[in-house]
Image (cartoon, coloured by chain):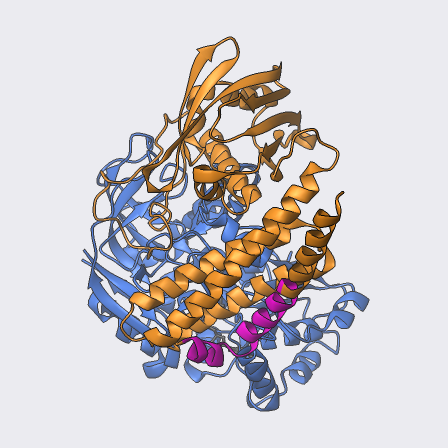
Chain colours: A orange, B blue
Amino acid sequence: MSERENESGRDVSQIVRGLGWFSIGLGLAEILMPGKLSRLIGINKEENTLALLRFYGFRELGAGIGILSQPQEPMWLWSRVAGDVVDLSSLLKALNSEENDNGKLLGALLAVAGVTALDVYCAEQLSAAGSSEGRGQRMSAQATETILINREPDEVYSYWHNYEQLPSFMKYIESVTLTGEGRSHWVAKGPGGIDLEWDAETTEERPGQFLSWRSLPGADVHHAGSVRFDKATGGRGTLLRVEMQYAPPGGRISATLAKLVGQDPGAQIKEDLRRLKQVIETGEVVASDASIHPGMHPASPPERVEDLNLALSPVS
Amino acid sequence: MKANCWMGKRDLRIQNVPDPKILNKRDAIVRITATAICGSDLHLYNGMVPTMEAGDVMGHEFMGVVEETGPGVKNLKRGDRVVVPFPIACGGCWSCSHQMYSLCENSNPNAGMAEKLWGHSGAGIFGYSHLTGGFAGGQAEYARVPFADVGPIKVPESLTDEQVLFLSDIFPTGYMGAEMCSIQPGDTIAVWGCGPVGQLAIKSAYLLGAERVIAIDRFPARLRMAHDKGGAETLHYEETDVLEALQEATGGRGPDACIDAVGLEAHTPGIVHAYDRAKQAMMLESDRPIALRQAVMACRNGGTVSVIGVYGGFIDKFPMGSFMNRSLTMRTGQTHVHRYLKPLLERIEKGEIDPSYIITHRLKLDEAPEGFAKFLAKDDDCIKVVLKPH
Ligand SMILES: NC(=O)c1ccc[n+]([C@@H]2O[C@H](COP(=O)([O-])OP(=O)(O)OC[C@H]3O[C@@H](n4cnc5c(N)ncnc54)[C@H](O)[C@@H]3O)[C@@H](O)[C@H]2O)c1
Ligand SMILES: [Zn+2]
Ligand SMILES: [Zn+2]
């Protein structure tokens, strides 16, 4: 490791520790005096807001303790980033409401935006440092997620192996087209209407057991992934295990990718796996009155169903 | 359609919202003929449950007539009269196949949110915050019922709405509360809380063979109902030392099982209440476990504490020493309603029980906000409010 990297490494770890304590402080403040805090940042002190602030408080506290106890673990910072995004969106929402003090809110918004930038920076540094060790390629984010599906491994495997139906549960994947010789072409919808595309090739295939793939040169998103299908104990179906590695994003793709895989790629994969489980066990992705809208939405029936992107797939 | 919407703490409004539509193939749309206000709704009303959004449609106890079915629903048709269980269950996951329907692994689209607070998620629930899915509830003219091929039970025309409505929640809840006590001949069961759930727990304890039931509350009308209709002995907790009275009644041994039908908003006179209110305000605990603490302390050695009152977050000063050293068992849960629909409908049909005796108020849907205020304050001896949307 060069001198310079060493320096910046120390900087990052100092900022990381600072962010950890910031999390703990903010978490405690949110839990113990949500009223004061909401006044400080200019949100109307309504009971629901307070409950939400306290809820955020527990989350902050968890992230803070995590950061301080495992400072090399980027996951905790990514969880802070995820939290920041929630905070930002609540503040933005509050900014649109007439009852709140917009001057103070704007201040809070800028502060959170600043902290978010810092969080992203540190998390990226840690992620890069973590995954460059011991691997040929520099991968910036790595995630492993598992789920139990109440079906035999053969059945779960063949559902996954039918690549063209992956968009039925992968939220951001628009289409997968087989292009022959173990290759496929993927289109993902990014925010702001930007499509991301890549070609992938299957690197290993053991029917009913294991699948792995990697993106080919020229991909918008460099990544490699694998899925294992193990028979779970005692008639519990299939224990499915996904491992993903994403290359460091750059340029135009950077922000889009961050949104695509989520600031916390593990969480995004977990959500996709939950939907896979729903599709296999119940026939389709389960919709609630709130879940069919992006972001928070009251639990009240939708105006029109035609506009909704309900991933309806055949009832099995 | 008209719906009773949560707009903030103690702020409910009847609003016009779009009619529900089929979103999944196994959905049905039900035209609601009767719906009730539950003690669980009071926790939302009082702002005790996080993740409510202004505009959420309330209500999880409802029944009605099937209007429309999705292509995946083969067992119901337009015109069928059904009661809908409050937890939403897919019928196909591991939990559902083990009859733990309120733990369905597929029905909560916000499972990730619930995992943050509880470690794992339970099933989706109608009209019960976004932690349990963000599903519009049944205090409305119509409701969308997901997994309609698994949940709703058809009810015979010979029974009135009021006789079967409580199959949606509180009759199975009271029954499960008693069942979790594993009642043996000669057993004495103590029940904290004589709200609708407590009343039906008392009845169920006798149905399941209890010798004596002792019911605890402070509202005379509720204690009277527990005594006159439920056949329980009663204790007024503000006038009696509950622990002492229970010891006395059982020769110092304590009740064989204790049912907490109170939950996180328990009340107690004096300093303990102030202590828990203060802790709750500072968020050092989110729930006030007053009845629960007492139930643990009262229970006989080796006995069972059955918790059907709802808790949301964290409690303080749980008497773990008493619980551990005296070999107690705790059983609890949101009710696995689907499991009880058929056997309890049969009991109603055979005339073994008619749960409608707990209804004290019948209102129009438009009057839901007043109904909540009355039910919360126990004004006018209010015990159970049923709303008629049509
Ligand atoms: N497990 C489930 O699936 C399920 C289903 C329905 C309701 N619930 C829960 O059951 C509980 C009761 O519901 P309900 O509809 O009867 O509500 P309710 O509010 O009408 O009844 C609660 C009763 O408890 C009494 N009480 C308060 N503090 C007490 C104390 N310290 N000792 C003894 N009694 C006390 C109150 O006076 C009241 O009569 C609620 O927490 C509700 O959320 C659970
Ligand atoms: Zn209820
Ligand atoms: Zn299920």
- Residue A285's x, y, as percent? 41, 36
Magenta stretch: helix, strand or loop mostly: helix
Residue B51 appears left or right of A229: left
Front one among A118 and B244: A118
Front one among B337 and B2: B2
At a point 33% along the width and 48% down the height, the residue shown is A293
- Residue A224's x, y, as percent? 59, 27
Q: Is residue B159 magenta?
A: no
Q: Which residues are magenta?
A: A19-41
Front one among B50 and A189: A189
Q: Is residue A136 above or below residue B165?
A: above
Quarter placement of the C terminus of chain A? top left
Q: Is residue B134 above or below residue B307?
A: above
At a point 68% along the width and 71% down the height, the residue shown is B296
- Can residue A300 be seen here? The reply is yes
Q: Is residue A35 magenta?
A: yes
- Residue A76's x, y, as percent? 63, 54
At a point 34% along the width and 77% down the height, the residue shown is A101
Front one among B53 and B204: B53
- Residue B145's x, y, as percent? 33, 45
Residue B39 appears left or right of A208: left
Quarter assignment of residue A164:
top left
At a point 53% along the width and 70% down the height, the residue shown is B263
Residue B177 appears left or right of B150: right
Q: Please count the marks in the image.
A: 0
- Can residue B229 be seen here? The reply is no
